[in-house]
Structures are given as structure tokens and as C-alpha cells.
């Protein structure tokens, strides 16, 4: 008896996040690819889960095992939190509304004016692809065909920065890209 792949042959793991990139359009992964953002992601906020497949079994009278079984794959979902209210991030995640400019006010004993942009929370779709680079910067995971929505997170504003939770699913195999829906990559130094 023999084992063709032993534990020592399979010891390869992806741990931690050193960099998190987002591109607004899913595309083939290439050397000259432009990424729209290197996003700050709150530690421990990234989740990637695939629900278990479900099976519908049909039985015939007199039998205790299924006559037929039809499986449905589980949905893949992911979520992460972006702790930024930078205007470029807000423009990407929300629908811009009327700007505010020159509103006079006194804060404490200091006088001044308020200005900024207004946004609607209207369920704007966020689409594209993400690249997660491991903590040791030797591996990456690229997830394509991403579609989700952002919602503001301000539950613990006294202790945690205002952020946006992005919840998404994968629209698998929606493009003609032959690279697939998820890539597991190794980085080789030049």
C-alpha cells in the first residue's frame, strides 16, 4: 500500500491579509491589470462562506433508499468592512446627492463652516473582483464575478470607526473568462 501525496507534500496554507484590492469590473487576471482601490479592511471582518448543498430525494413505495436525488449547490457569500469615509469610497459605494457648502456654525468656541457631499442609501450594486494577498505576501486569492451592496456600520461609533459593510455573492461563470471564478496564486520574486 502507498500514499501518493503525503502531508509534507500538501503543507501549503494561506493565512492573513496584507493587502486587499478591488477592481470595479471582473476581467481576466493579467500583468497590466489596473485595480481601482487598495482597501482598508477591518481585521476579522472578512468572511467567505459557501452553504452546504441541499438534496431533494424522491422515494418509491416499498423502498427505504431514495429512487432519485437532485442536488442544489450552496450559495457562496462574502462580506467585509471598509472603515473609510473618503469621498472616492463614498462615491463608489453610494449614490451621490446634493452637496453641502459654506454652512456656518460654531463648534466649541471655534467658528467655521461645514461642507461636504450628500449621499442616498438606495441599494446601489457594487460589482467587480477582489484580490487578497496573504500576510507573508507569497500567495493571493482572486475572486471574480463579485456582486454586492454596501450598508453603513455605525453601531459602536464610540469605539470603532464608521465603516461600510459590503455583503456580496458570486455570480459564477457570468463571463467568457476561462480562468474561472476564483484563482489561487503563488508569488515568485524576480
Image (cartoon, rainbow, N blue to C red):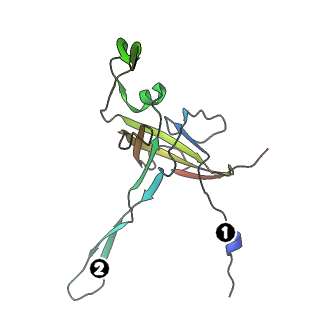
- Identify the image quadrant of the C terminus: top right
Is residue 34 among what the camera can see? yes
Picture coordinates of residue 21, whole percent (x, y): 56, 40
Which residue appears at 53% of the width and 51% of the height? 182
Give residue 108's quadrant in the image: top left
Classify 158 as above or below 97.
below
Taking 182 as reference, is 28 above or below it? above
Disc on res. 77: none
Secondary structure beneath label 2: loop
Picture disc at residue 10: 1
Secondary structure of the residue carrying tag 1 is helix
For label 2, the crowd category at 10 Å Cα-Cα, with few meaning under 14, some 14 to 19 and many 20 or more, is: few
Locate residue 170, reporting x and y percent. Answer: 43, 49
Residue displayed at 50% across by 39% down: 26
Write down the residue under mark 2: 67
Residue beneath the point at 47% across and 34% down: 84
Q: Residues within 10 Å of mark 1 (few under 14, many from 20)?
A: few
Q: Position of 69 compared to 188: left or right?
A: left
**Residue 5 in view (yes/no):** no
> Which residue is more in the foreground, 42 or 19?
42
Amino acid at each position: 500500500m502507498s500514499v501518493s501525496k503525503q502531508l509534507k507534500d500538501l503543507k501549503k496554507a494561506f493565512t492573513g491579509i496584507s493587502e486587499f484590492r478591488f477592481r470595479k469590473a471582473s476581467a481576466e487576471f493579467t500583468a497590466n491589470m489596473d485595480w481601482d482601490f487598495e482597501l482598508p479592511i477591518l481585521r476579522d471582518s472578512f468572511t467567505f462562506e459557501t452553504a452546504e448543498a441541499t438534496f431533494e430525494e424522491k422515494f418509491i413505495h416499498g423502498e427505504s433508499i431514495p429512487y432519485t436525488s437532485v442536488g442544489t449547490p450552496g450559495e457562496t457569500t462574502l462580506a467585509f468592512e471598509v472603515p473609510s469615509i473618503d469621498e472616492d469610497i463614498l462615491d463608489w459605494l453610494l449614490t451621490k446627492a446634493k452637496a453641502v457648502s459654506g454652512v456656518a456654525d460654531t463648534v466649541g468656541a471655534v467658528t467655521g463652516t461645514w461642507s461636504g457631499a450628500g449621499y442616498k442609501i438606495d441599494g446601489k450594486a457594487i460589482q467587480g473582483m477582489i484580490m487578497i494577498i496573504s500576510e507573508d505576501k507569497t500567495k493571493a486569492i482572486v475572486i471574480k464575478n463579485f456582486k454586492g451592496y454596501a450598508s453603513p456600520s455605525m453601531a459602536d461609533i464610540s469605539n470603532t470607526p464608521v465603516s461600510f459593510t459590503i455583503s456580496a455573492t458570486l455570480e459564477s461563470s457570468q463571463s467568457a473568462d476561462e480562468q474561472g471564478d476564483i484563482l489561487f496564486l503563488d508569488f515568485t520574486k524576480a
